[in-house]
Image (spheres, rainbow, N blue to C red):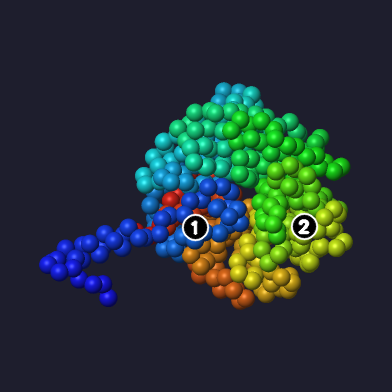
Amino acid sequence: MQPRIPGLSPLLFGLLLLVASAGSAAPAEDWPEFRGPTGQGHSTEEGLPLEWSDSKNVIWKVPVAGRGWSSPVVVGDRVWLTAAVETRGGASLRVLAFDLTTGREVVNAEAFRLRSAELTNAKNSHASPTPIVEGDRVYVHFGALGTAALTTGGDIVWTTKLAYESQHGNGGSPASYRDLLIISCDGSDAAFVVALDKRTGKVRWKTARRYPADQAYSTPLVIRVGERDQIISVGAYRAGAYDPETGKEIWRVSYADGFSNVPRPVFGHGLVYIATGFQQPSLLAVRPDGTGDVTKTHVAWTLQRAAPYTPSPLLVGDEIYVISDLGIASCLDAATGAPRWQQRIGGNHSASPTFADGRIYFQSEEGVTTVIAPGKEFRKLATNTLDGAMLASMAVSHKSIFVRTHTHLYRLGLAQ
């Protein structure tokens, strides 16, 4: 019970309690990069909508010009995206920001200009990697087309280009480590992992992949193993762990037929979970405490049935969840790989699943989000549909879900 202050009226006392409780409310958690603050699809936000449609629980919906599958990032009072806007004979690669409260566009800046807007893959775009926002800087990556740093006002700080041939366009997003941007560059002519100085865009280190090189589109993940940081970078035919300060390889694991890798790895229970890509997709659970080639010694278990090509895995508690590109969801024991359940939820899937407010959200390319309860038994909570295709993953912040379709950006939330 709160003590009363002598001489204070009950009304004024109540108002003071209301102000105090409002001031002690937990601040909103930002979503500053692909798959959120941990890079693994988790949010601590509560009070999110369970159900929505184009006419229900929509705080705002705004059109987004051009084409792009970069996922929204939310920092402070702005929501950030990238897009490729066609111009006469080419395209403008642009950085966009929207006001959190109103959805009004507040930044629209060009980072690069292309002579051709042609795409070699119908499901990709020229603006698929997700930005990183830190302080007053926005870092954007367009694969071999260019990487840039901008101020949050939209002014260019630096630009650079990393040379490699990418058959299907760009895909993987950068990872942030202290004063470095770490990027996986996997092309048909060259494959390497590179660290750029955030202040200048200059290369601090560059480590070549072992031969052969081939396409991959994955986003690195920084993990902590014992007293050492590692950057996990997934490429064609192999994944590796690198010292993020120097680029020196720590360990590697090989898979003979895996390329065009897209999913970002996840880490927990002393294991790194790696999707091996196309041809014969599988999910490997690898112990990250080895050195050199650990293919025969550190693979704890392997999933081969209904493994994903594109969506990243999701680790929640003692279970790991995956959704195949054809809409088969699986739940497995994270430590052993033992199956808990498998369920066809339908649709085609490219977006990575998200865990927030005690729920798991699966987004299909057809605009349908299936919400389930985590656990050892499958339990569907809701099915929600928006008007538009979804390949970008959602963002979660300010008690809201931010969804990008092929034409619009939505802020979904409960009425306050």
Mark 1 and mark 2: Cα distance apart in space: 29 Å
Q: Residue at x 67, y 47 (%)?
A: 219
Name the spot of residue 104 as percent of width and height, x first: 39, 40
Closer to the camera: disc 1 or disc 2? 2
71 to the left or right of 115: left
What amino acid is labelled 1 in the image? Thr
Q: Which residue is mark 1?
A: 385
Q: Residue at x 47, y 46 (%)?
A: 75
Name the spot of residue 410 as percent of width and height, x first: 45, 49
98 to the left or right of 340: left
Quadrant of the frame with the C terminus: bottom left
Q: Residue at x 65, y 29 (%)?
A: 160
Name the spot of residue 325 as percent of width and height, x first: 67, 56
Q: Which residue is mark 2?
A: 281
Res 222 seen here: yes
Question: In the figure, 69 relative to 293: above or below?
Answer: above
Q: Secondary structure at mark 1?
A: strand
Quadrant of the frame with the N terminus: bottom left
Name the spot of residue 192 as percent of width and height, x first: 77, 40
